[in-house]
Image: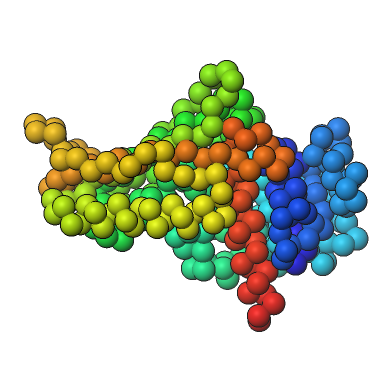
Amino acid sequence: MRVAVIGPGNIGTDLMVKIMRVSERLEMGAMAGIDPASDGLARAARWGVPVTAEGVDGLIALPGFADIGIVLDATSAAAHHANAARLRPYGKRLIDLTPAALGPFVVPAVNLRDHLDAPDVNMVTCGGQATIPVVAAISRITPVPYAEIVASIASRSAGPGTRANIDEFTETTARAIETVGGAGRGKAVIVLNPAEPPLIMRDTVLALITDPSPAVHEAVRASIAAMVADVAAYVPGYRLKQRVQVHPVPDGRSVATLGAAGATHVVTVFLEVEGAAHYLPAYAGNLDIMTSAAVRVAEEIAARAVLA
């Protein structure tokens, strides 16, 4: 299936590289941007991909637009609203890599096939792609009244789009922790780490559970390990940093204000995400997990179209 990428920045260019070098089901049909001097557009043109610097209108005007089945939007939350409205009459399938969240959230390891017929699916955020699978792995074993995630990424890997969308990041991720991860209440924090040399992405998941049984705790650990393997199947650099910790809620610590009255234990999970370095540096695992997840969804949409 031919696809187009809107947004020739780091994420959009990495998408293009993955599609051209790794995917067996997708073919680059176009790259669209608004800066004629962008490196992403120049690189696409050198590789023979049709390009336009006229944004979504330029994409629609390209001769091969009718043959494009999927459009991946790697711009910004505000831009996606406009892009989605402009593309709606043409019946293209949209995969949104911004926090706009116009369509349902999709995290491949958790709900890949639930929304493949939706016209516009949202890839949540990098922190969401990394941590929501873990929350879902816990909630499929025992209720999770509250889950909190902290995503720490290299400051150098956070471009203008990421910085402009910080508020949307926290709001979108928190909602997806609840709707996809299964937590009663979710919270998300992002940290831009200025360390040099840049550190790879690190994520922490803190989940409150209401079951004191050691057997359940071991089942939670096993469920998390299985889920990590599922994510690593399409993001090879995704891994547990250390053994999953399950500890009693400290005496005297009230969790009622978190909506978790009755919680007995805290599950703590430490993750790291190393990028595949297809285009982005290896420390930019936060961007790699987004592009890898988006390509996985696009491939499944393409496979379903073939079967149909």
Asked whether 159 or 243 is in front, the reply is: 243
Residue 69 can be seen, yes or no: no
Relative image position of residue 49 (x, y in whole percent): 86, 52
In the image, residue 201 above or below residue 80: above
Residue 284 in which image quadrant: top right
Q: Is residue 41 left or right of residue 92?
A: right
Screen quadrant of the N terminus: bottom right
Total numbered labels placed on residues in the image: 0
Relative image position of residue 171 (x, y in whole percent): 44, 41
- Residue displayed at 51% across by 68% down: 113
Residue 282 in which image quadrant: top right
Q: Is residue 232 left or right of residue 83?
A: left
Asked whether 4 or 91 is in front, the reply is: 4
Screen quadrant of the C terminus: bottom right
In this view, the residue farthest toward the front is 243
Relative image position of residue 51 (x, y in whole percent): 86, 48
Q: Is residue 82 left or right of residue 246?
A: right
- Residue displayed at 72% across by 40% down: 279
Relative image position of residue 101 (x, y in whole percent): 53, 51
Q: Is residue 303 left or right of residue 241?
A: right
- Residue displayed at 60% across by 61% down: 297
